[in-house]
């Protein structure tokens, strides 16, 4: 379990990378982030972690960092088209989706696809995907059967969304029994999406 950055008790972003080893039942501290960050998006893709955007204590970031657990090294990748924080990031075959966020002035509707292998070859790794029907940040996003699902956000009444076909639009599905709001933990297991907290 990898926990990069975050927020200290005094409210300031931190750069520490803490890792929990399930076999040893212990925490270790590994290579810190290049800069202190919180409010970022994070996803695992092909054995690496990708950290997207975030807040450095003074401004939102457009940086993208890749962490390689084999070498314990962070490397900077091609930046986002613009700074943001509070976005959702999820892995799909061949790419990551970066959904919503906040740019320091307003909530965002954008959905971006990031292709790590294009970035490795020096090509432009970013493409636009269907925008969210309404702007949101501090949302949770998860994949199930190669579809992306967005849950919650900065308001409790935001409808859950799914993106089954990237050539089509986001589709609203049934509201959960209770409002989710922001900061929920969301996980897919079997045919179910589990929502915890918020």
Image (cartoon, helix red, strand yellow):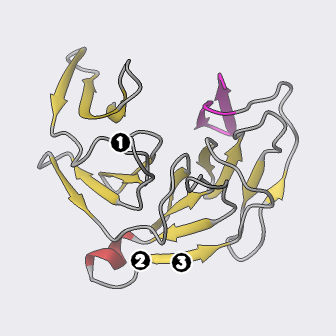
Q: Which residue is mark 1?
A: 37
Give the structural element (helix, strand or loop) at label 3: strand
Q: Callout 3: 10 Å neighbours few (<14), some, many (20+)?
A: few
Indicate whether residue 149 is drawn in magenta: no
Q: Would you place residue 69 above or below residue 120 in this image?
A: above
Identified at 39% across, 83% down, the residue is 124
Query: Disc 3 vs disc 1: which is toward the camera?
Result: 1
Q: Which residues are magenta?
A: 182-198
> Mark 1 or mark 3, which is nearer the start of the sequence?
1
Q: Position of residue 83 (x, y in %)?
A: 47, 61
The x, y position of residue 73, in whole percent, is 15, 50
Label at residue 125: 2
Identify whether 195 is placed above or below 34: above
Instruction: Please give the label number shown on residue 127.
Output: 3
Task: Please tell me whether mark 2 sits on a helix, a strand or a loop.
Answer: loop
Q: Residue at x 20, y 17 (%)?
A: 24
Instruction: From the viewer's perspective, tell me whether residue 36 is left or right of residue 140.
Output: left
**SS at mark 1?**
loop
């Amino acid at each position: 379990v990898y926990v990069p950055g975050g927020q200290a008790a005094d409210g300031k972003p931190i750069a520490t990378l803490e890792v929990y080893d399930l076999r040893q039942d212990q925490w270790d501290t590994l290579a810190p982030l290049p800069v202190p960050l919180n409010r970022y998006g994070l996803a695992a893709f092909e054995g690496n972690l990708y950290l997207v955007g975030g807040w450095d204590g003074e401004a939102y970031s457009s940086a993208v960092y890749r962490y390689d657990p084999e070498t314990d090294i962070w490397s900077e990748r091609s930046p986002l088209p613009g700074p943001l924080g509070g976005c959702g990031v999820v892995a799909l075959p061949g790419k990551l989706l970066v959904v919503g966020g906040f740019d320091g002035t307003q909530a965002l509707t954008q959905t971006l696809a990031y292709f790590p292998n294009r970035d490795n070859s020096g090509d432009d790794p970013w493409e636009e995907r269907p925008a969210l029907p309404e702007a949101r940040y501090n949302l949770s996003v998860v994949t199930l059967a190669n579809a992306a699902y967005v849950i919650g956000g900065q308001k409790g009444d935001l409808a859950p969304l799914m993106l089954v076909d990237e050539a089509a639009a986001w589709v609203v599905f049934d509201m959960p029994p209770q409002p989710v709001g922001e900061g929920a933990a969301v996980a897919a297991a079997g045919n179910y999406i589990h929502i915890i907290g918020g």
